[in-house]
Image (cartoon, helix red, strand yellow):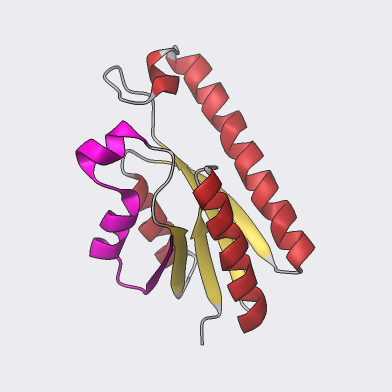
Amino acid sequence: MFKHILIPTDGSDLASQAVDKGLALATSLGAVVTIVTVTEPFHILSTDAMQVESSRASYDADAAAFARKVLEAAQAKAAAAGVRAETHHKWHDNPYQAIIDTALGEGCDLIAMASHGRRGMAAVVMGSQATRILTHSKIPVLVFR
């Protein structure tokens, strides 16, 4: 049915659970996965605590290190599950768009993701990434709660 699953993660507990469930689905289907995490570029006006306390250089370095840690953990889970996986770290002002673009660019036929992540107050104000992906994606989206 599905042969290539995109699993977005932001490193939150719920996203980590979605990685586990997405990998279990991939195992049962014999699918490959692409795992992506998206970092919003540094902005002077921000609702992200990491950005408020950082200079641009330190934010970029900290965000890249965090993304590497998140993707390494997801890659290790994929290897343990015997699932072929590749990982991507994207920088984009609109994480939902980066996720959709990655899914299309990598030829994914399903996006399997958490219902919400660590974006906190920004998600309350601007809406969740999952909702935006559900609204804009041209490929099926499976949302884990």
Q: Residue at x 35, y 73 (%)?
A: 139
Q: Residue at x 62, y 67 (%)?
A: 23
Q: Nearer the viewer, residue 114 or 26?
A: 114
Instruction: Single out the residue that lies furthest toward the bottom.
Output: 1
Judge left or right: residue 101 versus residue 73.
left
Quadrant of the rendered structure where residue 4 is? Answer: bottom right
Q: Nearer the viewer, residue 71 or 117?
A: 117
Judge left or right: residue 111 versus residue 26.
left
Magenta part of the chain: 120-145
137 drawn magenta? yes
Q: Could you say where residue 38 lies in the image, as x and y percent from the top left?
A: 45, 43
Q: Could you say where residue 76 lies in the image, as x and y percent from the top left?
A: 74, 53
Q: Is residue 34 above or below residue 13?
A: below
Quadrant of the rendered structure where residue 78 is? Answer: bottom right
125 drawn magenta? yes
User: Can residue 140 be seen at all in this image of the molecule?
Assistant: yes
Q: Is residue 119 above or below residue 72?
A: above
User: Can residue 30 be seen at all in this image of the molecule?
Assistant: no
Q: Residue at x 43, y 39 (%)?
A: 118
Q: Could you say where residue 79 lies in the image, as x and y percent from the top left?
A: 76, 61
Q: Nearer the viewer, residue 63 or 101?
A: 63
Q: Is residue 17 above or below residue 125?
A: below
